[in-house]
Image (cartoon, rainbow, N blue to C red):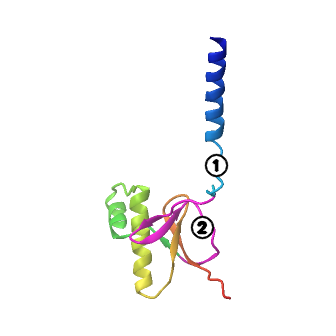
Amino acid sequence: MKKLLFLMSLAILFAVTTSQIPSKDTNPNLATVRRVRGVPVFVMCEPNAAYEATGKVSDDDASSILKSIDGQSSYRTINESCSVIVDNAQRKQKKGKLTFDAILISDDGHTGTCIKFKTEEK
């Protein structure tokens, strides 16, 4: 009975310790990037690739301004803020004011930095 308990506890210990070791095939610094309206959005993180900032955008739009004038709450979820930021960035891009490949969303979720990835010339 003691041998059985010892073997079971040893098996559980082995299972717990090996499940925490990352595979050699995976990189813990990589993640899947979420896309909002086809634009890669990095929320509170940065890409590993080299990039340069091309402009700033915010989640201010007509509805949030009207709500603040009326005294209503202009609270938005992070998903809603990301959608508005992407809309504002795409509108500026159509007007020719900036170009971007992705957007970095700030910690507060109300502003975004448009970025363009640097390409390595050979």
Residue found 62% across the figure and 34% down from its top? 16
Up the image or down, 46 lies above or below 13; here it is: below
Q: Secondary structure at mark 1?
A: loop
Q: Residue 60: tell me if it is visible.
A: no
Left/right placement of residue 54 relative to residue 76 reads: right
Identify residue for label 1. Answer: 22
**Which dot, 2 or 1, sits closer to the camera?**
1
Q: Compare residues 115 and 10 and report the one nearer the observer.
A: 10
Is 28 on the left or on the right of 57, as rendered? right
Using the rendered view, name the quadrant where residue 88 is placed. Answer: bottom left
- Is mark 2 in CB contact (under 8 Å) with mark 1? no
Q: Is residue 13 left or right of residue 85?
A: right
The local crowd at label 2, few if under 14, some if 14 to 19, many if 20 or more residues have their Cα within 10 Å, is: some
Kind of residue at disc 2: Pro
Mark 2 or mark 1: name the one nearer the start of the chain. Answer: 1
Residue depicted at x 63% and y 72%: 49
Please state the horizontal and vertical placement of residue 7, each as a whole percent of the image.
65, 22
Magenta-highlighted residues: 29-55
